[in-house]
Image (cartoon, helix red, strand yellow):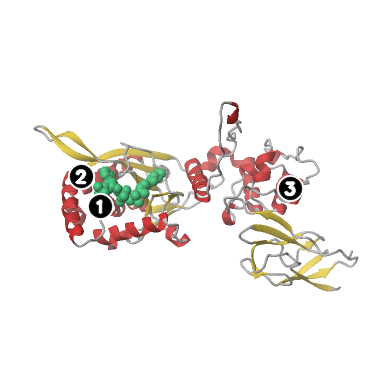
Amino acid sequence: MAIQEIRVPDIGEFKEVEIIEVLVKVGDSIQAEDSLITVESDKASMEIPSPAAGTVKELRIQQGDHVSKGSLILYLELNSAVEKKPPQVPITHPQPTTHSTPLAPLDAKANTNTNPNKPKTTSAAKTVVDHEAFKKAYATPSVRKFARELGVDLSRVVGTGRKQRITQEDVKSYIKDVMGLGLQAKTATSPHSGLGIPRMPEIDFSQWGEVTTVRLNRIHQLTGEFLHRNWLNIPHVTQFDQADITDLEAFRQELNLEQEKIKSSKITPLVFIMKAVVAGLKAYPRFNSSLDPSGEMLIQKKYYHIGIAVDTPDGLVVPIIRDVDKKSLLQLSDDLKEVSTKARERRLKPADLQGSCFSISSLGGIGGTQFTPIINAPDVAILGISKSSLQPIWNGKEFAPRLMLPLSLSYDHRVIDGADGARFTTFLAKMLGDIRRLLI
Ligand code: CAO
């Protein structure tokens, strides 16, 4: 049997592009035109098809490798009756949202589907396919074909691949969801949620007056997906409380006078709150854990990295301040300044956003009395801070003016019981009410 080297064909201006998916394995029997690998540049991704039919004998690439025209992909043992084919044209499709330009037309295969309005449905995935949304879904042609064959509406499938690309495994998981478990059971354990939830209708608002349409930037889109996923997957409960920070505030003002003299970072209430949170995580370790996706195991963390929600012109980002337990208030102020500046100047690296234990969303500098923050999974809780205000508080003899800080703690009710939620905010209020306790 003849062995043929299968190389990357002419892929135009794409050079040293990354292989993001290897679609075949040794021993696979493939047909001419079957996709072998998916490569991706910053502008588009494409699948490289096989020029011939045969059996894969040896793979010479792996996911993550970079290839150009002529790179060896694999050795193919040709079928005996080999039909010589001209070099195959790779199938290109654009990145969905990497650039702020509108989406380019979708891949050729998707658009030339012989009968896109009549997808084959199975009992596994009897859904009404939203064809416009299907076209916009971020998936390779082979995954689209797979989904179309099974009648799966890709717009309902959550992508877990790079940049939220929908993989074949995602389509399979979606089918399993629909077949077996139903929405209620799945929301407890799986990242694939939102099943059966009707999509919002598309509305032409211009029928009621003048409008302009603006594409959401990448951060807004990603944050939206992330928050939506967390909102659907996690049973949130929000516990409200308030801390008397009158004494803390007096101390903070004193410290800031000293800081001003040495022209050092200003200290805001947030660094005290970070310290109080770490004390809370130590006292109530369940708040410093993550739930395994199976829903059966709790991963207990022994480190104290806190995510801080930062409002930037591009949208919300949550950089991490590491080892908060080991840092002084002054160090934390410097760190806070550094990460929020980096966030606003778009200088954060992916590693700066990973590894949080617990997150804090402080709207205290802006206003509001309370809100219900969405948990930054895989954290199991998030603390929302609103603006402190002077309030008349009864001290046993009289009403005295005290500076009260509103706390809004959202927690994952699968991991944390309501009583512990209330204990945690009570503990925080106690720590912030008398910061000497943080030293104990
Ligand atoms: N009550 C009253 N005043 C407060 C306060 C509170 N709870 N928290 C902060 N302030 C004051 C600060 O002391 C500062 O006042 P001075 O300039 O007079 O000292 C002012 O408000 C501005 O503070 P800041 O917001 O710049 O600093 P911070 O350390 O409190 O917060 C950061 C830093 C990065 C968290 C914040 O700038 C930010 O981006 N917050 C928005 C977070 C967000 O968008 N959350 C929503 C996410 S959706 O859940």
The amino acid type, in three-letter code, at marker 3 is: Ala
Mark 1 sits near ligand 1, with its Cβ under 8 Å away: no
Residue position marked by numbered label 2 in the rendering: 245
Q: x, y percentage for residue 232?
A: 50, 41
Quadrant of residue 2 within the rendered picture: bottom right
Of 417 and 136, nearer the camera is: 136
Beta carbon of the mark 2 residue lies under 8 A of ligand 1: no
In this rendering, position of residue 96 left or right of residue 53 = left
**Looking at the image, is mark 1 or mark 2 earlier in the sequence?**
2
Amino acid type for the residue under numbered disc 2 = Ile
Looking at the picture, tell me which residue is in the foreground, 180 or 98. Answer: 98
Amino acid carrying mark 1 in the image? Phe
Give left or right: position of 378 versus 253: right
Which residue is drawn at the image coordinates 33% and 57% (left, top)? 337
Q: Which residue is mark 3?
A: 110
Task: Answer with mark 3 or mark 1, whichever residue precedes in sequence.
Answer: 3
